[in-house]
Image (spheres, coloured by chain):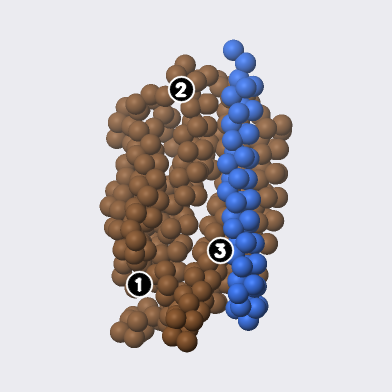
Amino acid sequence: MTHLPFIVASYALGILIPGAYAIAAYARMRNARLRLAAIDPRQHRSAR
Amino acid sequence: MTGVDASSVVSPPPGQRSAGRNLHRFANPGRFLRISGAVLPWLAATALALIAVGLTWGLFFAPADWQQGDAVRIIYIHVPAAWLASGGYMALAVCSVLSLVWRHPLADLAAAEISPVGAGFTALCLATGSLWGKPMWGAWWVWDARLTSVLVLFFLYIGHVALVRAFDDPVRGYRAGAILALIGVVNLPIIKFSVDWWNTLHQPATIKFTGAPTMFVGMLWPLMICLLGYTLAFVAIVVARTRAAVMERRIRGLLMARAAEDTAA
C-alpha cells in the first residue's frame, strides 16, 4: 500500500487551510481599512 | 459593544485602573493597531519562510521511519496542528479571563477571532490524523480517548463561535463565550494525559518538557521549524483578524455617531 496519496492530501490541507485563513484575514483587514479611510481619513491614519 | 463610540473602548472602567494598569495599557485599540501594524508583516513573512523550510525539509530530506515508512512525514503537519488546537484554546481561555475579570475590551475581540482559527487548526489536526491513521491503523477513525477528546475540543470551538454570535447584544455574547471557554479548559489536560490515563491506539507523547525527545534529530529539527512556523502563522492570522475587528468596530461607532447627529439635526 503506497502512502503517497495520504501524504499529499495532508500537505495540501496543511497549506490550504492556513492559507485560506490568511487570505481571508488579509482581505477583511484591507476592506476594513478602506472603509475606515472613506468614512474618516484621520482615524484611518491612526490605524495604519 | 456594537454602537459604542470608538473612544469608549480606549479607557478601562475607573474602578479597575489600579488593578490592571499594565494590562490596560495594551488594551488600548489605537496602540494595538499601531504596534500590530508594524509587527504583522514581519510575523507573516517569518511564518511563511519557516513553514516553507520545515515542510520542504520534512517532505524531501528528513528520513522515513523504520516502521511507518514515508507516512511519518504527516507528522510535520499533524503535530503543529495538534499543538495549536490546544495552544489556541489556552489563548482563548486567557482572553476569557481577561474579559471576565478586567473587562479587557481587546480580549473580547481577540477571543472572538481566536475561536474560528482554532476550529480550523483542530479540523486540520483531525483530518491529518485520519489520513495518518488509515495507512497505519487500517481505520480512518477510532473512538480512542485522544481522538475523542480532540473532537470534543473542536465542538467547544464551534460552540464558542456560535455562542458569541447568538446574542443581539455582543457584550452578552462575549460573556457567554468566555464562560463556555473557561468550562472547556477542563478538556485540555484530558487531551494531554489521555494517552497515559487510558489504553489508547494513539501513541504517547514523543516530545516531553520533562525529558529528552524519543525522536531522531534529523526528524526533530524540521518538526521544530514547522511548529514555530505554524505557531507564528496562527498568531499572525489572529492579529490580522483582530485588527480588522477593531477597525470594523470603529466604523460602526462612527456611523452610529453620524446617524445620531443626523437625527438630532
> Which residue in the protein does label 1 denote?
B103
Q: Is residue B19 above or below residue B45?
A: below
Pair 3/2: label in front: 3
Q: CA distance from mark 3 to mark 2?
A: 38 Å
Relative image position of residue B115 (x, y in whole percent):
44, 52
Q: Is residue A14 above or below residue A38?
A: above
**Residue at the spot 59% in from the left edge and 38% down from the top edge:** A14
Q: Residue B189 versus residue B250: which sits nearer the camera?
A: B250
Chain B colour as displayed:
brown
Write down the chain letter for disc 1. Answer: B
**Residue at the spot 31% in from the left edge and 67% down from the top edge:** B100
| Residue B97 visible in this rendered orientation of the protein | no
Write down the chain letter for disc 2. Answer: B
> Which residue in the protein does label 2 denote?
B140
Circle 3 residues within 10 Å: few <14, some 14–19, many ≥20: many
Chain A colour as displayed:
blue
Pair 1/2: label in front: 1
Q: Residue B262 versus residue B221: which sits nearer the camera?
A: B262
The lab-note entry on whether marks 1 and 3 share a chain reads: yes
**Residue at the spot 65% in from the left edge and 67% down from the top edge:** A34
Q: CA distance from mark 1 to mark 2?
A: 43 Å
Q: Residue B178 versus residue A47: which sits nearer the camera?
A: A47
